[in-house]
Protein backbone atom coordinates (compact mmCIF):
# COMPACT_ATOMS: atom_id res chain seq x y z
CA UNK A 1 0.00 0.00 0.00
CA UNK A 2 1.38 3.40 -1.02
CA UNK A 3 0.56 6.12 1.47
CA UNK A 4 0.20 9.72 0.33
CA UNK A 5 -1.03 12.49 2.56
CA UNK A 6 -1.34 16.07 3.70
CA UNK A 7 0.44 17.82 6.55
CA UNK A 8 -0.68 21.08 8.13
CA UNK A 9 -2.68 22.26 11.11
CA UNK A 10 -5.61 22.22 11.45
CA UNK A 11 -6.94 20.00 8.66
CA UNK A 12 -10.71 20.00 9.19
CA UNK A 13 -11.54 21.26 5.70
CA UNK A 14 -9.19 19.35 3.41
CA UNK A 15 -9.68 19.56 -0.35
CA UNK A 16 -6.84 17.13 -1.02
CA UNK A 17 -8.19 14.27 1.08
CA UNK A 18 -11.53 14.16 -0.73
CA UNK A 19 -9.96 14.81 -4.13
CA UNK A 20 -7.45 11.97 -3.99
CA UNK A 21 -9.91 9.50 -2.45
CA UNK A 22 -12.21 10.12 -5.42
CA UNK A 23 -9.29 9.99 -7.87
CA UNK A 24 -8.18 6.59 -6.60
CA UNK A 25 -11.73 5.23 -6.72
CA UNK A 26 -12.73 6.59 -10.12
CA UNK A 27 -9.40 5.71 -11.70
CA UNK A 28 -9.31 2.21 -10.21
CA UNK A 29 -5.92 3.09 -8.71
CA UNK A 30 -5.28 0.24 -6.32
CA UNK A 31 -2.98 -0.04 -3.31
CA UNK A 32 -2.97 3.72 -2.72
CA UNK A 33 -4.36 5.70 0.19
CA UNK A 34 -4.39 9.41 1.07
CA UNK A 35 -4.25 10.32 4.76
CA UNK A 36 -4.40 13.52 6.76
CA UNK A 37 -1.50 14.17 9.14
CA UNK A 38 -2.38 17.15 11.37
CA UNK A 39 0.97 18.17 12.87
CA UNK A 40 0.77 20.59 15.77
CA UNK A 41 4.46 21.36 15.30
CA UNK A 42 6.64 21.06 12.19
CA UNK A 43 9.20 19.16 14.29
CA UNK A 44 6.79 16.21 14.10
CA UNK A 45 7.68 15.91 10.41
CA UNK A 46 10.91 14.15 11.44
CA UNK A 47 8.91 11.26 12.92
CA UNK A 48 6.63 11.16 9.88
CA UNK A 49 9.65 10.76 7.58
CA UNK A 50 10.46 7.48 9.32
CA UNK A 51 7.14 5.99 8.17
CA UNK A 52 6.54 4.45 4.76
CA UNK A 53 5.39 7.58 2.92
CA UNK A 54 5.16 7.84 -0.88
CA UNK A 55 4.45 11.57 -1.06
CA UNK A 56 3.02 14.50 0.86
CA UNK A 57 1.18 17.73 0.26
CA UNK A 58 1.90 20.64 2.60
CA UNK A 59 -0.58 23.31 3.65
CA UNK A 60 -0.68 26.18 6.14
CA UNK A 61 1.15 26.94 8.32
CA UNK A 62 4.09 24.82 7.10
CA UNK A 63 4.73 25.75 3.45
CA UNK A 64 7.75 27.81 4.48
CA UNK A 65 8.60 26.12 7.78
CA UNK A 66 9.18 22.72 6.16
CA UNK A 67 12.05 23.85 3.94
CA UNK A 68 14.89 23.31 6.49
CA UNK A 69 13.65 19.74 7.06
CA UNK A 70 14.03 18.72 3.39
CA UNK A 71 17.09 17.27 1.65
CA UNK A 72 16.56 19.09 -1.66
CA UNK A 73 14.46 21.81 -3.30
CA UNK A 74 13.17 22.05 -6.85
CA UNK A 75 14.24 25.30 -8.56
CA UNK A 76 10.69 26.71 -8.60
CA UNK A 77 10.19 25.99 -4.89
CA UNK A 78 13.58 27.54 -4.10
CA UNK A 79 12.75 30.70 -6.09
CA UNK A 80 9.30 30.96 -4.51
CA UNK A 81 10.43 30.18 -0.97
CA UNK A 82 7.50 27.86 -0.26
CA UNK A 83 6.81 24.13 -0.64
CA UNK A 84 3.47 22.37 -0.98
CA UNK A 85 4.63 18.99 -2.35
CA UNK A 86 7.23 16.62 -0.90
CA UNK A 87 8.63 13.81 -3.01
CA UNK A 88 10.12 10.79 -1.22
CA UNK A 89 12.65 9.09 -3.49
CA UNK A 90 15.77 6.97 -2.91
CA UNK A 91 15.76 7.80 0.78
CA UNK A 92 15.67 11.56 0.20
CA UNK A 93 12.99 14.24 0.45
CA UNK A 94 12.63 16.93 -2.20
CA UNK A 95 10.33 19.94 -2.04
CA UNK A 96 8.28 21.27 -4.97
CA UNK A 97 5.66 23.96 -5.45
CA UNK A 98 2.69 22.75 -7.50
CA UNK A 99 0.67 25.86 -6.53
CA UNK A 100 2.79 27.66 -9.12
CA UNK A 101 1.61 25.41 -11.95
CA UNK A 102 -2.01 25.25 -10.79
CA UNK A 103 -2.28 29.03 -10.55
CA UNK A 104 -0.39 29.81 -13.76
CA UNK A 105 -2.47 27.50 -15.93
CA UNK A 106 -5.81 28.68 -14.55
CA UNK A 107 -4.83 32.38 -14.67
CA UNK A 108 -3.77 32.21 -18.33
CA UNK A 109 -7.15 30.67 -19.22
CA UNK A 110 -9.01 33.25 -17.12
CA UNK A 111 -7.42 36.46 -18.39
CA UNK A 112 -8.36 37.96 -21.76
CA UNK A 113 -5.69 37.35 -24.40
CA UNK A 114 -5.14 41.08 -24.79
CA UNK A 115 -4.72 41.73 -21.05
CA UNK A 116 -2.34 44.64 -20.59
CA UNK A 117 -2.49 45.98 -17.05
CA UNK A 118 -1.03 45.63 -13.58
CA UNK A 119 -2.09 43.45 -10.65
CA UNK A 120 -2.76 43.76 -6.95
CA UNK A 121 -1.98 40.78 -4.71
CA UNK A 122 -4.12 40.99 -1.58
CA UNK A 123 -2.22 39.35 1.27
CA UNK A 124 1.45 38.72 2.03
CA UNK A 125 1.37 35.23 3.56
CA UNK A 126 2.77 31.97 2.23
CA UNK A 127 -0.05 31.62 -0.30
CA UNK A 128 1.04 34.81 -2.06
CA UNK A 129 4.54 33.56 -2.84
CA UNK A 130 3.70 31.29 -5.78
CA UNK A 131 1.36 33.97 -7.11
CA UNK A 132 4.17 36.55 -7.16
CA UNK A 133 6.50 34.17 -9.03
CA UNK A 134 3.86 33.41 -11.67
CA UNK A 135 3.18 37.12 -12.29
CA UNK A 136 6.91 37.77 -12.58
CA UNK A 137 7.28 34.95 -15.12
CA UNK A 138 4.37 36.10 -17.31
CA UNK A 139 5.45 39.75 -17.08
CA UNK A 140 2.50 41.23 -15.21
CA UNK A 141 3.71 44.04 -12.89
CA UNK A 142 2.20 43.75 -9.40
CA UNK A 143 1.98 45.34 -5.97
CA UNK A 144 1.44 43.46 -2.70
CA UNK A 145 -1.28 44.82 -0.42
CA UNK A 146 -0.91 43.92 3.25
CA UNK A 147 -2.09 44.89 6.72
CA UNK A 148 1.54 44.53 7.79
CA UNK A 149 4.30 47.09 7.46
CA UNK A 150 6.99 46.75 4.82
CA UNK A 151 4.91 45.92 1.74
CA UNK A 152 4.01 47.94 -1.37
CA UNK A 153 0.56 49.11 -0.31
CA UNK A 154 -1.89 49.03 2.58
CA UNK A 155 -5.67 48.67 2.38
CA UNK A 156 -5.86 52.28 3.53
CA UNK A 157 -3.89 53.28 0.42
CA UNK A 158 -6.42 51.49 -1.79
CA UNK A 159 -9.37 53.18 -0.13
CA UNK A 160 -7.82 56.65 -0.16
CA UNK A 161 -6.42 56.66 -3.70
CA UNK A 162 -8.96 55.75 -6.45
CA UNK A 163 -6.23 55.66 -9.10
CA UNK A 164 -4.75 52.46 -7.66
CA UNK A 165 -7.84 50.38 -8.44
CA UNK A 166 -8.21 52.04 -11.85
CA UNK A 167 -4.62 51.19 -12.79
CA UNK A 168 -4.73 47.54 -11.64
CA UNK A 169 -7.18 45.45 -13.65
CA UNK A 170 -6.22 42.14 -12.01
CA UNK A 171 -6.87 41.71 -8.28
CA UNK A 172 -5.93 38.43 -6.60
CA UNK A 173 -7.12 37.54 -3.10
CA UNK A 174 -4.56 35.28 -1.42
CA UNK A 175 -6.00 35.81 2.08
CA UNK A 176 -8.41 33.30 3.71
CA UNK A 177 -11.07 36.03 4.10
CA UNK A 178 -14.47 34.74 3.04
CA UNK A 179 -13.68 31.05 3.56
CA UNK A 180 -16.51 28.90 4.97
CA UNK A 181 -17.95 29.35 7.56
CA UNK A 182 -17.05 33.07 7.62
CA UNK A 183 -18.59 33.59 4.19
CA UNK A 184 -19.63 37.25 4.58
CA UNK A 185 -16.07 38.46 5.09
CA UNK A 186 -13.98 39.95 2.27
CA UNK A 187 -10.86 42.10 1.77
CA UNK A 188 -11.37 45.80 2.46
CA UNK A 189 -11.03 47.35 -1.00
CA UNK A 190 -13.20 50.01 -2.73
CA UNK A 191 -15.43 47.65 -4.73
CA UNK A 192 -17.52 50.49 -6.19
CA UNK A 193 -14.49 51.49 -8.28
CA UNK A 194 -14.41 48.13 -10.06
CA UNK A 195 -15.52 47.93 -13.70
CA UNK A 196 -16.20 45.30 -16.36
CA UNK A 197 -12.50 45.59 -17.29
CA UNK A 198 -11.44 44.23 -13.89
CA UNK A 199 -10.59 40.58 -13.23
CA UNK A 200 -10.95 39.23 -9.68
CA UNK A 201 -9.28 35.93 -8.82
CA UNK A 202 -10.00 34.48 -5.37
CA UNK A 203 -7.80 31.63 -4.12
CA UNK A 204 -10.67 30.69 -1.78
CA UNK A 205 -12.84 27.90 -3.26
CA UNK A 206 -15.36 27.29 -0.46
CA UNK A 207 -17.91 28.80 -0.96
CA UNK A 208 -17.82 28.59 -4.76
CA UNK A 209 -18.81 32.26 -4.99
CA UNK A 210 -17.17 34.30 -2.25
CA UNK A 211 -18.23 37.70 -0.95
CA UNK A 212 -15.17 39.11 -2.77
CA UNK A 213 -16.41 37.62 -6.05
CA UNK A 214 -20.02 38.72 -5.50
CA UNK A 215 -18.93 42.31 -4.88
CA UNK A 216 -16.88 42.22 -8.08
CA UNK A 217 -19.69 40.72 -10.19
CA UNK A 218 -22.03 43.44 -8.96
CA UNK A 219 -19.74 45.94 -10.69
CA UNK A 220 -19.48 43.86 -13.86
CA UNK A 221 -16.01 42.43 -13.15
CA UNK A 222 -14.93 38.98 -14.32
CA UNK A 223 -14.44 36.58 -11.37
CA UNK A 224 -12.91 33.16 -10.69
CA UNK A 225 -12.46 31.08 -7.53
CA UNK A 226 -9.53 28.86 -6.57
CA UNK A 227 -11.01 25.45 -7.42
CA UNK A 228 -9.34 25.12 -10.81
CA UNK A 229 -5.99 26.07 -9.26
CA UNK A 230 -6.47 23.42 -6.55
CA UNK A 231 -7.28 20.72 -9.08
CA UNK A 232 -4.27 21.75 -11.16
CA UNK A 233 -1.89 21.69 -8.21
CA UNK A 234 -3.25 18.30 -7.06
CA UNK A 235 -2.68 16.76 -10.49
CA UNK A 236 0.82 18.25 -10.60
CA UNK A 237 1.46 16.71 -7.16
CA UNK A 238 0.46 13.29 -8.49
CA UNK A 239 2.79 13.76 -11.47
CA UNK A 240 5.70 14.71 -9.15
CA UNK A 241 5.14 11.73 -6.85
CA UNK A 242 5.10 9.31 -9.77
CA UNK A 243 8.15 10.62 -11.63
Image: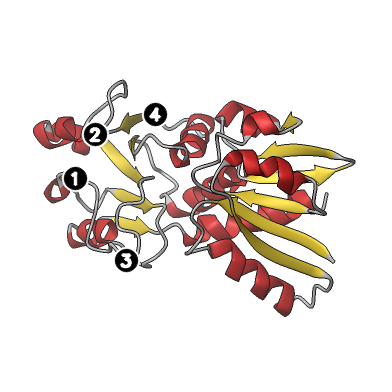
Residue at the spot 51% in from the left edge and 34% down from the top edge: 138
Label 1: which residue? Answer: 188
Indicate how the structure is coloured in the image: secondary structure
Could you tell which of marks 3 and 1 lies nearer the N-terminus?
A: 3
Q: Position of residue 228 (x, y in %)?
A: 51, 60
Quarter-wise, where is residue 16 in the image? bottom right
Q: CA distance from mark 4 to mark 2?
A: 11 Å
Residue at the spot 12% in from the left edge and 31% down from the top edge: 161
Which residue is more in the foreground, 218 or 7? 7
Classify mark 2: helix, strand or loop.
helix
Label 4: which residue? Answer: 141
Q: Position of residue 102 (x, y in %)?
A: 57, 50
Looking at this view, name the residue that lies furthest to the right: 90
Could you tell which of marks 2 and 1 lies nearer the N-terminus?
A: 2
Classify mark 4: helix, strand or loop.
loop
Mark in the foreground, 1 or 4: 1
Which residue is more in the foreground, 95 or 234? 95
The disc placed on residue 167 is: 2
Q: CA distance from mark 2 to mark 1?
A: 18 Å
Q: CA distance from mark 3 to mark 1?
A: 18 Å
The disc placed on residue 169 is: none
Mark in the foreground, 3 or 1: 3
Q: Is the residue under label 3 in contact with that under label 2 (CB below 8 Å)?
A: no
Residue at the spot 33% in from the left edge and 43% down from the top edge: 170
Which residue is more in the foreground, 117 or 9? 9
Q: Is the residue under label 1 in contact with that under label 3 (CB below 8 Å)?
A: no
Q: Is the residue under label 4 in contact with that under label 3 (CB below 8 Å)?
A: no
Q: Is the residue under label 2 in contact with that under label 4 (CB below 8 Å)?
A: no
Q: CA distance from mark 1 to mark 4?
A: 22 Å
Label 3: which residue? Answer: 181
Amino acid sequence: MKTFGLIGYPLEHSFSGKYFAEKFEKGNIEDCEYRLFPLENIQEFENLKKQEIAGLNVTIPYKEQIIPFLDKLDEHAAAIGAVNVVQFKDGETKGFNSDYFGFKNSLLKFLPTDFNSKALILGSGGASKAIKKVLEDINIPFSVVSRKEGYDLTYTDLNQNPEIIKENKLIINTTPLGTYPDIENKPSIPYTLLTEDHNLYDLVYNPAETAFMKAGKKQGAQVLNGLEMLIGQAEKSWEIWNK
